[in-house]
Image: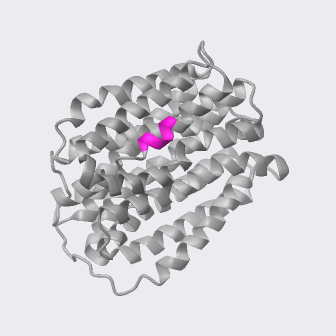
Amino acid sequence: MADPLSAHYGVSLAAIGLLTTSLFVTHLAAQLPAGRGADRFGSRRVALLAVAAAVAGNALLLVDAGYALALLGRAVVGLGSGAGFVAGLDLVRAGGGGTAMQGVYGGSTMAGGGLALMVVPSLTDATSWRAPYWTALLLAVVGALPTLVATGLPRIGHTGRWVGDRTLLPIGILQAATFGLAVVAGNWVVTLLEREGASSTAAGLAGGLVLFVGILTRPFGGLLAGRAGAHRIAAAALVGTSAGALLLALAGSFAVSTLGALVLGLLAGLPFAVTFAAAQRARPDAPAAAIALVNACGVLTILVGTPLAGLAFGLPGDGRLAFAGIAALSAGALLVVRRADL
C-alpha cells in the first residue's frame, strides 16, 4: 500500500512509513499498562477496550483523506492493537492453554497482516485508498464476538510494581530479531517486488508470505518445543529469518524473491510459543506484564526499523539495503539468544 497511499496523501514513502510508526508508538505505549491491567482486572476487560479502540481508529481513518488525521487514526488503532495482543495471549493462559495453544494464538495474530498483504492491494485497485481501513474495521468487529463469550476466567488480581527483570531481555531480543524484523520486512516487501517489476497482485501474494505463513509455524513451534528444544528452535528461526531477508536483498528473479519471503515468514514465526512461555515462566506473579515487556522489544524494533527501511528506498539499490540490514541484525542476535533462559 506504500505507493498508492503516497500518491493519495501527497507525501513521500518515508512519510508513509510514519503511518506504521504512528501505530506502533501507541502500540508500544499500551503494552505494559495493558499487561498490568490484565493481571489486575482480567484479560477480557482489556481485550474489549482494545477492540473498541481498533474500531474507533479505523472509523476515523475512513472519514477524511488528510495525512495529519491519518496519523491520529493510526495512533488510536495502535492503542487497540497493543492492548489486544497482550490481553489475547493472557486470555489463552487464563483459559489453561499451554505452549501449543499459545502457538495457535500466535498464528492467528499473523492472519490479519498476512491477509492484508495478499488481499488489500487488489481491493485497493478495485475500490479506493480506504481499503486497508474498512477491512481492518470489519476484522476488529469480528474479533469482539469470541471475546464477549470468554467469561468466568481467573485473574491474578495483583497491583505489584512494573516488571523489570533482566532475564526477560534476551527473550525480548529474540522477539525483536524474529517478529520485529519480519514485520519491518513485511511492511516493505510488496514495494520492493513492485519496484522489481511485479504486478501489485503478484507482489501482494508473494509479500504476504512474510506474515501469512506464520499462521502455520507459530503453532508448529509450540508443538515442536518438547522435542527439538527451545534453544534449537530459536537458533533455526534466526538463521532462517536472516537467510530469507538475504534472498530478498539479492534482487534475483521474482521466484527467488518469493522464496526469500517464504523462508523469512516460515522461520520467523517458529519461536513465538517458546518465547512467551519463557516470559510467563520467568514471572508467574505478573505473566501478562512479562508478555508485554518481551513483546515491547519487538514493537520497538518495528517502530525504529520501518521508517529507516523506507529511507533505504531512496538510496542505491532501491530498497535492497534494508533487507540486507535485516539479514545482518537477525544473524547477529544468535550471539545473545544463546544465553536466554528458554
The total of numbered circles placed on residues is: 0
Residue extending furthest bottom?
Answer: 152
Q: Is residue 66 magenta?
A: no
Q: Is residue 267 magenta?
A: yes
Screen quadrant of the N terminus: top right
Along the line of sight, which residue is nearer the eye, 32 or 151?
Answer: 151
In the picture provided, is 334 more to the left or to the right than 203?
Answer: left
**Residue span colored magenta:** 263-268
* Residue drawn 73% across the image and 60% down it: 63
Q: Quadrant of residue 173?
A: top left
In the picture provided, is 266 more to the left or to the right than 312?
Answer: left
Residue extending furthest right?
Answer: 126
Is the magenta region chiefly helix, strand or loop?
helix
* Residue drawn 53% across the image and 28% down it: 309
Residue extending furthest front?
Answer: 227
* Residue drawn 37% across the image and 65% down it: 101
Q: Quadrant of residue 203?
A: top right
**Looking at the picture, how far across and down is residue 270, in whole percent?**
39, 46
Residue 115 seen: yes
